[in-house]
Amino acid sequence: MQNLDDLLKEAIQKATTERGNINILIAGRSGVGKSTLINAVFQQNLAETGQGRSVTQNTREITRDGIPITIFDTRGLEMSQFKETLSELEKVIKDRSGDKDSNRHIHVAWLCIQEDGRRVESAEVDLHNMLSKHVPLITVITKARSDNGFKNEVLGLLPESKNVIRVRAIQEELDDGYTLKPIGLGSLIELTSEVIPEGKRRALAAAQKANLNYTKAQAHKIVAGAATAATVAGASPIPFSDAAILAPIQIGMIAGITSVFGLELSKGTLTTLVTSAIGVGGATFVGRTIVVNVMKLFPGIGTFAGGAISAATASAITVGLGEAYIAVLAEIFLDNPEAVPSAADIAEKLKDKMLNKSK
């Protein structure tokens, strides 16, 4: 069996590779609220804290270490050189779409139009026409307060949009004391997920903070995959082999869930989480494994029955561990979407969750 250090390294590399990186182009006139939208949707106030790099005269590439997303923020829709700006942007999109590395492609574009303006400018129509030829396009009506038919007007003028959605990124206090709460951000993530490649959905989940249910759904897929692998491992006819096979499966599952929740995926973090989980679940797991593996030592029906029982046990234990971990992280981020929990805090909560489940 591999040592723990090697298992952790492989799990981190696999989780990072499978998550990948997503690239979103966000376009719109000055003042439509692009930066506010970015900060409301993505981790760590990305528009404020990310590193900016110019890719054209009027397009900025925003990244931040630890967040698997690149935002392309376009400007200059009001400039007299708009056609030149549009041409430069189209070249960037084409060049990236031809790259062999899918992590460099532009996977989706958001065209932002503010509701207060009550009109779609010709520059926005031109931008819609260009973008929709090359990437899936979602039109985002920002600063939504009162539709009055504007969404339908946008749908008619920008027909190549995959969808049009009204959003309000931040809470607003009106003069009459009435409060307008944020709307549409979670739905924007779901609509975006529908048009991006499936392989980029984990990156989207890890990068965003607006839709906890979306992140949980991606994590549940990881658990399902691990459970299937654990079933196969548990059904192995070789005595005492399944514990060695299950270890990398369960460690990989923990790494994948950690990654999709946007948490730091380091050897130190994963070591703390894994040792905590093993400390709670290890005794029960070992006891059941010994029983079914002893059954495998008997020829014929003993091997078959032992394998069948072990498969069910291996799957159940794997699912229990994965779902407990998801529940712990969901509770943390439900209380505070901006939380940056330490590995020790998560491990302690996971231990409590597993102990309570076992009673």
Image (spheres, helix red, strand yellow):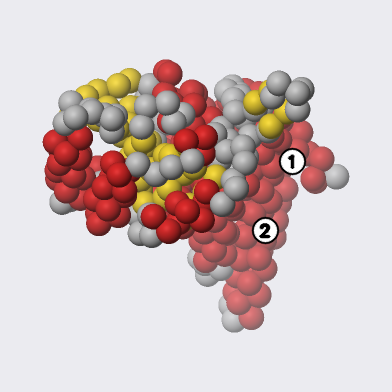
Vertical arrangement, residue 37 with respect to residue 183, above or below: above
Query: In the orientation shown, which residue stands out farthest toward the right?
Result: 359
Specify the label residue 91 is tagged with. none
Query: In the depicted view, which residue is nearer to us: 202 or 87?
Result: 87
Percent x, y for residue 311? Answer: 61, 66
Q: Taking 118 as reference, is 68 left or right? A: left
Q: Residue furthest bottom?
A: 300
Q: Nearer the viewer, residue 78 or 40?
A: 78
- Numbered mark located on residue 316 in the image: 2
**Can the viewer see residue 309?**
yes
- Image coords of residue 93 (percent x, y): 21, 45
Q: Give me the residue at 36% from left, 32% from top.
A: 29
Check the picture and name the quadrant holding the C terminus: top right
Question: Is residue 332 shown left or right of residue 352?
Answer: left
Image location (x, y in percent) of residue 340: 57, 23
Disc 2 secondary structure class:
helix
The kind of residue on which mark 1 rests is: Met
Q: Earlier in the sequence, mark 1 or mark 2?
A: 2
- Amino acid type, label 2: Ala
Label 1 and label 2: CA atoms lie apart by: 13 Å
Which residue is more in the foreground, 125 or 260? 125
Mark 2: few, some, or many residues within 10 Å (few <14, many ≥20)? Answer: some
Relative placement, left or right, of 162 versus 282 is left
The residue that appears at 32% across and 31% down in the rendered structure is 73
Labelled pair 1, 2 in contact (Cβ < 8 Å): no
Give how far across and how far down residue 108 sits, in percent.
35, 48
The mark found on residue 354 in the picture is: 1
- Total label count? 2
Residue 254 lies in quadrant: top right
Q: 10 Å neighbourhood of mark 1: few (<14), some, or many (≥20)?
A: some
Say which residue appears at 67% left-offset and 58% top-offset: 316
Q: Secondary structure at mark 1?
A: helix
